[in-house]
Amino acid sequence: MKLNELTIKQSIEGLRSKKFSSEELTKECLKEIKKKNVTLNAFISVCEEEALKQAKRADKLISENQEALLLGIPIALKDLFLTKGIKTTAASNVLNNYIPQYDGTVTSKLKEAGAVIIGKTNCDAWAHGSSGENSDFGPTKNPWNEEYVPGGSSSGSAVSVAANMCIASTGTDTGGSIRLPASFCNVVGLKPTYGRVSRYGIIAMASSLDSIGHFTKTVEDSASLLNVTAGTDPKDATTPNVRVDEYSQDLDKGVKGLRIGIPKEYFMEGLDNKIKEKVKRVIKFYEKEGANIVDISLPTTKYAIACYYIIQPSEVSSNLARYDGIRYGNTRMEFGSEAKRRIMLGTFTLSAGYYDAYYKKAMKVRTLIKKDFDDAFKKVDAILSPVSPTLPWKIGEKVNDPLKMYLSDIFTVTANLSGIPGLSIPIGFINDLPVGLQILGPNFSEKTLFRIGNHFERSNKNGL
Amino acid sequence: MKINVKHVAKLANLDLKENEFDELEKQLSLILSYIENLQELNTEDIEETSQITGLKNITREDKTEPSLSQEEVLSNTKSKENGLFKVKAIFEEQ
Amino acid sequence: MDYKPVIGLEVHVELKTKSKMFCSCLADYFGQKPNTHTCPVCLGLPGALPVPNKTAIEWCLKIGLALNCKIKNFSKFDRKNYFYPDLPKGYQISQYDMPFSENGDIDIKNKNWSKKIRITRVHMEEDTGKLIHSYKSGEESTLIDFNRSGVPLVEIVTEPDFKTAEEVVEYLKKLQQIVRYLEVSDADMEKGEMRLEPNISLMIISDKSLPKYKAEIKNINSFKFVEKAINFEIKRQTEILKSGKTPIQETRGWDEKKQITISQRQKEEANDYRYFPEPDIPPFKFDDKYIKELSTQIPELPDTKNTRFQKDYSLPYYDAEILTRDKKIANYFEEAVELGLKEKIEPKRIANFIINRKINFSEIEPAAIIEEFKKGKVENVDNIELDNILDKVIIDNTKAVSDLKNGKQEALMFLVGQVLRALGKKADVNLIRERIEKKIK
């Protein structure tokens, strides 16, 4: 196996037992980036010099028998994560020359854990998108079939891991922006509970919906990475002071006795039949393994997209107001068409005469959506569903139909509206394109999600 | 639902071209028609959710920490003068 | 047709916390090198998040309590969205429909009248950066300093209960005194620590309903311009109304040099602020127990202290008012009184001493004053007595007074001599000199 194909766990073991160095590992990843990035366009910035410096430093610490959770591991960051001294663009021409004056909290935590920051990944500009096609730096391609979208908005981060250009990567999930590309690229994607991971230093999309997560090759890796990023932050007032679990603790506990809910609204018309069949087979697997499968209903589901596409653009329109070109960046004329669309929509839904009918109404519907989950989690420990109603589509197919694009978020937005965590794991291929399974749980139940996901992963090395 | 795109663009501080106005109006109309489905729901006695953390009274102690240096603050603009950001003259009076 | 002014006030008070409202930058921006006290939060950098200052909120609540407001059990911050170069985030974090406190009142008075002003609300928000006009190499531009951005501001809004500029001045003096007593702000208008925006309109005296327009006046930067600006605006509106027209609803700026108000068309367009709850800051819940506890921390306020001094120390209103103007002096006085009790020195004599002499309070301890009394070196000069003598001397010596007005300093010495003679006892010469100059101005 080539070094860049390793997982975090394998890399840590290899580095500790001195089988290879961080410099070698990083160089392999950089080689892969040089080979593939021209076509896949997963990276906006590659930090070759900085990364090698960090790798050498990690090697020195390893030789001194120092330990840290990610010591020497090459990790890529979605280009919404501010990195001091390293260009951070949000994949937009508005910030194509912005060099941040500070590191965000998660970036600092990763660095403190010894990670090697290998580059900044491409994404839909400002995280506005579900396909990876809205970047001002060109679309990112799906490594499984370059004619297809990798999913968005964390497109580059998903691809960077799927194509083994790095060992793990970070992303943001506001309406499915980690879970969707994870499922389209055959990698593990985690959207933690809202507030579990600090948003300080990450370009805000929709403040009450943004969740900070990551992509890994295995569920086990996802758990160990969460142990680095999770925790309350005095710089982010929306991070509760909830104890950080030992997320790997329940990985091998299996699913016996767990009550798993199957929401009927997520299996109705509009869902590709082949995806439905595959997910149903996975559910059967869990049932066989001892889980209690429970039919549940989340009745407000059909209003979730409308609710989301009012609240999110409203907050976006306000969060993007600071980009006026005075203190940094270029003028507002450089905003792309999707950004302009969302700013206009959000400004309208907050405006005088419309606030009550739109924003206020959506906030009430949000209460109902949250209540759906609160009620469900009284009966079940977790919920399973598809991630996407369709398989990955061809690049350019939905680009001229914004509403159609928005509807691809139908199974993912509910987790953001209610704040709950969601894990996307690969469950196989259909027509040679990856399919993912979504595992949802109550707030701060990431340990259970990993448990359920890991059980499938361990027992089905090639999916179902 | 027809949006006054010119008015909204002004509120949003977006300088749009004529052809952009038309296209945006069409697209936004479509999106808004879809969003209208929320009106089907009866939410009369439902409270609004604006915060999903359930947190209350989060504050910080009144202590100071080092600020950015003037150089760092101005590092991302070419339009500056004597340590200040510079923009086109703004006149408050007629 | 007779018109009467209808004036409501919006006053912003800058709190003297150590750090800013939503970040840990130094809040004391006055005189600092530009853009040296900012951080990602108050500079509006991408990714920055606000975290509220605990002390600032407590102080805002205390101001509310001092103004007899009801502290709300539930409150929150909201975003006020608009674009202006001094507003780095493109929105100001403020409070809209659920402010920290509401519905209070304040008593204001003068020699000839007293009245109650209703306080609509007291809420918290953040300050903007500062704009400076520049003219360099033939080019005009605006320069921006963000040191002030994010400094905590308390906004105090009144009902339109004011009828005259004089009432407004008394209100400002009282408000300034209260926040100084609370030690939450120095409220120095010239330093921008207290800012006034009156809303002025006129109504026909016989009318029952309020006028349908109002003019908001900005840029009144010192006490001395308050009366002038308001009276100018009243006159301006009166003339428009008398000509049969209605004044426009607009924002106007006070021009110090020209001593007039000028229309500020730029700011006037009805701004739709699109308020919505601030998603980055969780809401606030204050239970009655907490509010009660907080109210015990409010010090004795000026009016109460004044009444108590009159009662406890048998002082006339005039003396009590002077002694309670500044809390430090009031405390000094009481300390001296307590020491004086043992020596059987009456509070009135101590009051006279403090009022009639120029004392360097920071250098001379109350105990030292009591020593002076014990040595028998203190003459008893009653404040009202002195004031009456000053008035009489000025009336009786018109030539000397006009000489003084024309700059002849010897005339001053002469007048002081006259006062001392009429007084018949020793008194502080410097103080008398000052009092004469003040009366003549």
Image (tube, coloured by chain):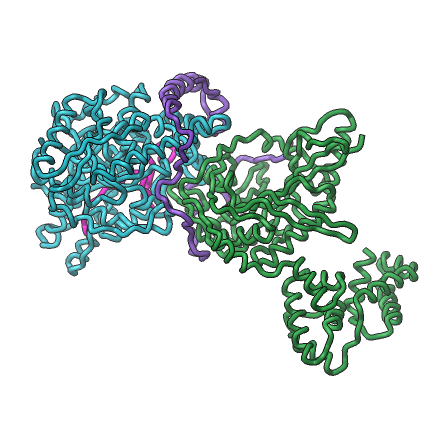
Chain colours: A cyan, B purple, C green
Q: Nearer the viewer, residue A224 or C335?
A: C335
Residues shaded magenta: A71-97
Magenta-drawn stretch, dominant element (helix, strand or loop):
loop
Q: Is residue A167 magenta?
A: no
Q: Nearer the viewer, residue C441 or C147?
A: C441
- The quarter of the rendered structure image containing the C terminus of chain A is top left
| Location of residue A68 by image quarter | bottom left
- Please indicate whether residue C159 sits to the left or right of residue A42 in the image: right
From the top left corner, tell me how far across and down residue C247 is, in percent.
70, 29
Q: Is residue A75 magenta?
A: yes
Residue C26 shows up from this direction: no
Identified at 65% across, 69% down, the residue is: C332
Q: Nearer the viewer, residue A427 or A298?
A: A298
Q: Does A249 sit above or below residue A320?
A: below
Residue C196 shows up from this direction: yes
From the top left corner, tell me how far across and down residue C307 is, in percent.
69, 61
Identified at 82% across, 75% down, the residue is: C426
From the top left corner, tell me how far across and down residue C157 is, in percent.
60, 43
From the top left corner, tell me how far across and down residue C133 is, in percent.
59, 41
- Please indicate whether residue C78 sits to the left or right of residue A116 in the image: right
